[in-house]
Image: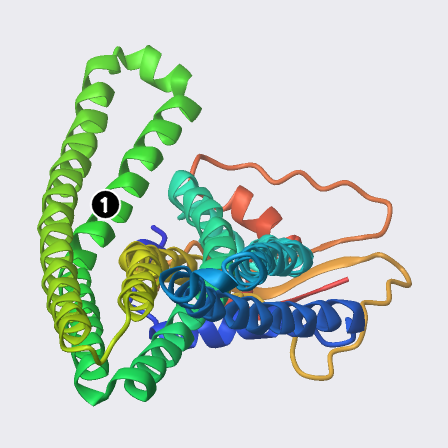
Amino acid sequence: MRRDHADPANSPRRNDWQTIKTLAPYLWPAGEQALRLRVVLAMIFLAAAKGASVAVPYVYKQAIDALDGNQGALIAVPVMVLISYGVARVLAQALGELRDAVFAKVAQRAIRQAGLKTFRHLHRLSLRFHLDRKTGGVSRAVERGTKGIEFLLRFMLFNVVPTLVEVILTCGILWYLFGIWMALVAFLTIGVYIAWTLAVTEWRIQFRRTMNATDNEANTKAIDSLLNFETVKYFGNEDHESRRFDKALARYEDAAVKSNTSLAFLNIGQGAIIAIGLTAIMWMAADGVVAGTMTLGDFAMVNAYLIQLYMPLNFLGFVYREIKQSLIDMEQMFRLLDENPEVADSPGAKPLAITGGELRFENVSFAYDARREVLHDISFTVPAGKTVAIVGPSGSGKSTISRLLFRFYDVSGGRITI
């Protein structure tokens, strides 16, 4: 009897910050100066793109005010302003694309290194882990984990942070130009939107986590059944295997329906918050135009700022949900790295030096499980160049001896020498 290893999907959760901390070295790889330079350049392009983006509504206001003003200046001033408007939009787009292009190699290298490290670690784990493994679940955890890294790197660094910076800049501009109340309404709208998104998303995570677990379960059952195709045929168990697979799919279906229903609830709330905030601010701007304290250009600029801000903010809800899902996927993969190899060399162990080649089992005892000892006080010698046959009934320990010889397990007592 062998003890079971915990399924990564059902192990205790890592903190999200632990997952991000594990990922951080891949973003700033030691000894990779070229990749570090790419990270710095990407940050510069990000800042420049946001600067150009924030300038667009202000240039738009200048164009409207020029068109609404002295008609004698209609030939020169609006043309230059409109050209500036076009240049600002092009720069915002181009700098954003340059940022993505520069960072692409960093993201792909991080995915490659994390996948390779996980693969190597799986090969370092003991035979016990792999005999007890759920092949489909482990492979799916690694697959989703590497995809989660790509999404997290691209959207957390280049969507969440820039959007928050743009929120601060926009509220600051509204405060400076039109007073604290308009900025306060905009800030409160964004705050309520973010609070709603975070609260409902945290509630929805349980459904996504269940989807992951049931997806792993269904995939594991399918792969294990197909790997044992011959045995299934021997016993005519096709219908039984189909029922087991369908039960797992039914659990996934139930979790997926709950996830999609709760998503609709989240989106309705987000839309209502944005609509109320936008209407309130535009009402204030329209009142300012009527009172003569704001121009039509100001009215258009406020609307442009809010639309420019709320569009990525609406996307921020999706991004946050996917970031949480990516963290869950990465957490499952990184938990595989937390598995400690059962067989490990002692500190300061010297490389094996074979001189004669004589093999000795000296009072070797071994148990897969403490409740049942497979080998007890076994001793024998195989001289160099000789052949020894080990015979016995099934379960007597023949395969166990070969596994101990290759050190797939450590002995419980005694020693093996070469």
| Residue 136 position by quadrant | top left
Indicate left or right for 200 with 143 as reference. left
Residue 156 image offset from top left, x and y in percent: 44, 65
Q: Residue at x 65, y 57 (%)?
A: 98
**Is 211 rendered above or below residue 54?**
above
215 or 310: which is nearer to us? 310
The C terminus is located in which quarter? bottom right
* The furthest residue to the right: 355
In the drawing, does residue 329 fall left or right of residue 143? left
Work out whether 189 lies above or below 103. Answer: below
Mark 1, other Cα within 10 Å: few <14 / some 14–19 / many ≥20: many
**Residue position for label 1:** 211
Q: Secondary structure at mark 1?
A: helix
* Residue drawn at 38 percent across, 44 percent down: 137
Tell me what residue is drawn at x 33 percent, y 61 percent.
Answer: 304
Quarter of image, res 107: bottom right
Q: Nearer the viewer, residue 352 or 53?
A: 53
Number of numbered markers: 1
Q: What's under tag 1, amino acid-wise? A: Met
**In this rendering, is residue 2 above or below 284?**
above
Query: Can you see residue 171?
Result: yes
| Residue 80 coordinates in the image, percent (x, y) | 59, 61
Q: Who's the residue at 65% across and 74% down the image?
A: 28
Residue 180 placement (x, y as % from top left): 21, 89
Image check: 94 left or right of 356? Answer: left
Image location (x, y in percent) of residue 7:
33, 54
- The type of colouring in the image is rainbow
Q: Is residue 334 visible?
A: no
